[in-house]
Image (cartoon, rainbow, N blue to C red):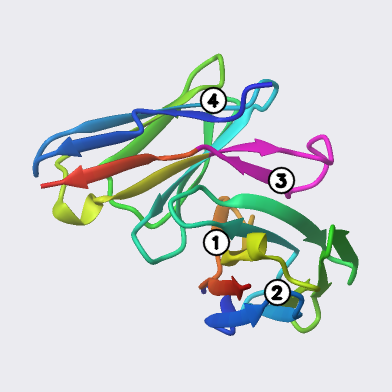
Amino acid sequence: DAGVTQSPTHLIKTRGQHVTLRCSPISGHKSVSWYQQVLGQGPQFIFQYYEKEERGRGNFPDRFSARQFPNYSSELNVNALLLGDSALYLCASISWPGGGTTNTGELFFGEGSRLTVL
Amino acid sequence: QQPVQSPQAVILREGEDAVINCSSSKALYSVHWYRQKHGEAPVFLMILLKGGEQKGHEKISASFNEKKQQSSLYLTASQLSYSGTYFCGTERSSGTYKYIFGTGTRLKVLA
């Protein structure tokens, strides 16, 4: 089975531009979440989606938005890029071992999209 | 709000043991552990649900004490492949969902 796929793997943008990052979860997983990881730090939660609905949002400005499609793939959009947005953006596909009866899931990460803003 | 991990960094020789701790100021209902190698994505190791259970994965095990709001990761007879940064993670589900990673512990195993 294919794992979590993210695209593009690397990209360079300039300040003020817009970027769209894409994620395809593991087959059968209906939930994805997005994280920003700045070099030397741990991942920071941005969004979680389940069944195309936003279920959670981290402390990120409104320049960050996301959506999930009927096939459970997802896009993360960042507008008006700043130098500080340079980071590794990780998508995680979430498996709910309790079949949805527990609140906790296992996160399987893609390799990430490395964004550099100049 | 971010769980605090200790130690921040540790260097081991192959075959030595290590313990990584994760402490939260907020109630923990579950704890996840991940290992991230340089330039790679985090890899899920194990999940612990409240109830004080201990789980194992090869020579890596963990415990979870929800009363103390702490979890510990135990690495026994460490191997070179154990090198990386270890993160604990926890979910917050009051109202809206959030996922929070701990501060991280860099572990280096030397031959």
> Which residue corresponds to the image point at 73% horizontal and 71% vertical from the top-left?
B78
Viewer-nearest of labels 1 and 4?
A: 1
- Label 2 to label 4: alpha-carbon separation: 46 Å
Mark 2 crowdedness (10 Å alpha carbons): few <14, some 14-19, many ≥20: some
Mark 4 crowdedness (10 Å alpha carbons): few <14, some 14-19, many ≥20: some
Task: Same chain for labels 3 and 4? Say yes or no.
Answer: yes
Nearer to the camera, A8 or A45: A8
Instruction: Chain letter for mark 4, please.
Output: A
Mark 3 crowdedness (10 Å alpha carbons): few <14, some 14-19, many ≥20: some
Q: How many labels does the image show?
A: 4
Residue type at numbered disc 2: Glu
User: Residue at label 4?
Assistant: A52
In the rendered structure, the answer to whether residue B29 lies left or right of residue B88 reads right
User: Residue at label 1?
Assistant: B100
Q: Where is residue A59 in the image (x, y as percent from the top left)?
A: 38, 57
Which of marks 4 and 3 precedes in the sequence? 4
User: Residue at label 3?
Assistant: A105
**Residue B14 numbered mark, or none:** 2
Compared with residue A72, is residue B75 higher up or lower down, i.e. above or below? below
Outermost top residue:
A70
Outermost front residue:
B111
> Which residue corresponds to the image point at 51% horizontal and 47% vertical from the top-left?
B41
Q: Give the range drawn in magenta.
A: A92-110
Viewer-nearest of labels 2 and 4?
A: 2
Dot 4 falls on a residue whose secondary structure is: loop
User: Do the CB atoms of the residues marked 3 and 4 lie less than 8 Å apart?
Assistant: no
